[in-house]
Image (cartoon, rainbow, N blue to C red):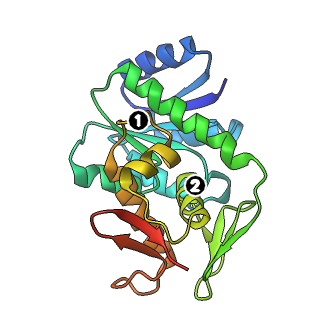
Amino acid sequence: MAHILIVDDDAEVLGTVWRALSREGHEVTLAESSAQARARLQQSRPDLLILDVMMPHQDGLAFCAELRKMEQYATLPILILSARWRTDDVITGLDMGGDDYLTKPFELKELSARVRALLRRAPVISEPQDAISVGELFLDPKTFQVSTPQKQNIQLTSTEYRLLHWLMSRPNHAHSVRELLDAVWQYPVGTGDPDLVRAHIRNLRAKLETDDARSTHIHTIHGVGYMIKV
């Protein structure tokens, strides 16, 4: 089972999530603020971080962005919890470094499914893989970094890495949002939010491209999905 760190200033939410995940056999650590979370992280790096957005002193999104700037947490799976449910809010959470986003109130079954999906993806990334080169893109599985002639050693999150690896492994083929949700996020068929794919595609483009007005690496095939061309 996994070590999961939950950060939320609501004691009731902490208790509920702790009980649900503990029953599934996980080791669960609690923190009521980003300051407490930093202390917990210094003691032990978890396998998954569940992070509330609305917290005093420093909100969860700022804390998430802070962690993503640190090499040791660049690939840490992060599930964002928030009462903010609008599409723009979800996209903002993913833009700040979240791998997934779950709105409050939520069903415990849904939380458990998201946790299982995030944890299921992590071992696949840690398995040895060969470096992959497609066109101008070079992806290094040891460092989770991608390089182009214009940009070197671009750090990716675990989800960005999986998404880019999937596209690079299957060039010249258009992949639908549904296909990417099933394959990369590994959610059960028919579940998952399409905004997850769109937000992570946008984040990858922001890291890869030098011209914001034109995408030269990840192409949108209108009415179909996304493709890397060779």
Q: What kind of element bears circle 1?
A: loop
At 23% from the left and 51% from the top, the residue drawn is: 87
Disc 2 marks which residue? 162
Q: Is residue 39 visible?
A: no
Q: Position of residue 57 (x, y in %)?
A: 38, 46
Judge from the rendering whether residue 213 lies leftward or rightward of residue 8; answer left or right.
left
Q: Position of residue 168 (x, y in %)?
A: 58, 67
Q: Earlier in the sequence, mark 1 or mark 2?
A: 2
Task: Report the quarter where the N terminus lies.
Answer: top right
Judge from the rendering whether residue 224 lies leftward or rightward of residue 183; answer left or right.
left
Is 25 situated above or below 65? above
At 79% from the left and 52% from the top, the residue drawn is: 128
At 42% from the left and 63% from the top, the residue drawn is: 201
Q: Position of residue 99 (x, y in %)?
A: 47, 48
Disc 1 marks which residue? 189
Amino acid type at circle 1 is: Val
Q: In the depicted view, which residue is nearer to us: 181 or 16? A: 181
Q: Position of residue 191 (x, y in %)?
A: 36, 36
